[in-house]
């Protein structure tokens, strides 16, 4: 039980931080759960479900403040879902490590853009066709790359939306909504194995929900546009650092 309480506290901390960027905490929670002695399949299924739970509560807050760009979010969701299997199929024929190193390069580039480049923010209302077009384009790329690399598409969506001129808060909120469904889809794939620990899930769900509510509050009410950009950039660097560690760790043994 002590292990599950520690897992819940860790879930709260990282969910709070990563909700600000709208990318979900599963990529960090899974290795931490493993370090705590939680079996792999249980760790993966629980972390992905926690992602969905957290982003549901965050998205409720974002929707109330009208931060979710629905005309972009829905095309991203639909197209990403459709193209993710194609990316997974392509991955069967390509060297995975090379692809992962390329994605690490993208994350470092995107994080640097967030920290050091100031995109020209859109003024006024954007044409509906452009919003839908952005959603289709970003969703296609995120879905394909997510399936190809086995990583969360949110890591790609947020920086690209900001680069396109979206307000960082709207980019983060829009991505959070998409992550609900992408994570739940991944959870369903693992749930069929039946490796769910109810106590772990219940305690971590409390941490996930409270972390999501706090993270969404900080992003909406306490952080400026520039601070959100910096937070997203640093989080992308953290994701890149974790991926680099995963890639080089086998070489050290």
Image (cartoon, rainbow, N blue to C red):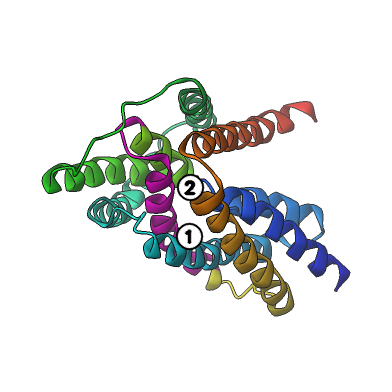
Placement of the N terminus among the 4 image quadrants: bottom right
In this view, the residue in front, 179 or 164, is 164
Q: Quadrant of the C terminus?
A: top right
Mark nearer the N terminus (1 vs 2): 2
Q: How many marks?
A: 2
Region of the chain picked out in magenta, as a range: 163-190
Q: Whole-percent x and y of residue 130?
A: 16, 41
Q: Residue at x 35, y 52 (%)?
A: 85
Q: Residues within 10 Å of mark 2 (few under 14, many from 20)?
A: many
| Residue 243 seen in this snapshot | yes
Q: Which residue is mark 1?
A: 183
Depth check: give the residue in front, 125 or 234. 125
Decide if residue 38 is in sight here. Answer: no
Q: Is residue 103 left or right of residue 162?
A: right
Dot 2 lies on which element? loop
Please tell me whether residue 135 is drawn above or below residue 192 in the rendered image. above
Residue holding disc 2? 152
Residue in view at x 40 percent, y 50 percent: 175
Picture layout, residue 72 above or below residue 180: above
The spot of residue 7 in percent (x, y) is 76, 62
Question: Separation of disc 1 and disc 2 at Cα?
Answer: 8 Å
Residue 16 falls in which quadrant of the image?
A: bottom right
């Amino acid at each position: 039980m002590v292990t599950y309480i520690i897992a819940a506290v860790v879930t709260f901390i990282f969910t709070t931080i990563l909700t600000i960027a709208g990318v979900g905490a599963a990529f960090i929670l899974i290795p931490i759960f493993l370090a705590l002695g939680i079996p792999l399949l249980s760790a993966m299924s629980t972390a992905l479900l926690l992602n969905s739970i957290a982003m549901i509560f965050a998205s409720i807050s974002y929707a109330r403040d009208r931060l979710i760009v629905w005309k972009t979010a829905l095309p991203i969701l639909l197209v990403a879902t459709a193209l993710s299997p194609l990316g997974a199929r392509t991955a069967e024929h390509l060297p995975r490590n090379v692809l992962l190193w390329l994605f690490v390069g993208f994350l470092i580039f995107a994080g640097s853009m967030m920290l050091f480049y100031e995109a020209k923010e859109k003024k006024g209302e954007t044409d509906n066709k452009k919003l839908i077009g952005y959603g289709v384009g970003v969703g296609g790329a995120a879905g394909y790359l997510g399936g190809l690399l086995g990583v969360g598409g949110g890591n790609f969506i947020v920086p690209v939306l900001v680069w396109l001129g979206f307000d960082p808060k709207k980019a983060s909120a829009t991505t959070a909504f998409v992550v609900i469904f992408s994570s739940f889809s991944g959870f369903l794939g693992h749930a069929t194995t039946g490796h769910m620990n109810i106590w772990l899930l219940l305690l971590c769900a409390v941490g996930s929900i409270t972390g999501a509510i706090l993270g969404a509050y900080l992003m909406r009410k306490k952080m400026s546009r520039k601070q959100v950009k910096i937070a997203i950039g640093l989080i992308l660097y953290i994701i890149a650092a974790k991926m680099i560690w995963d890639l080089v760790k086998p070489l050290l043994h």
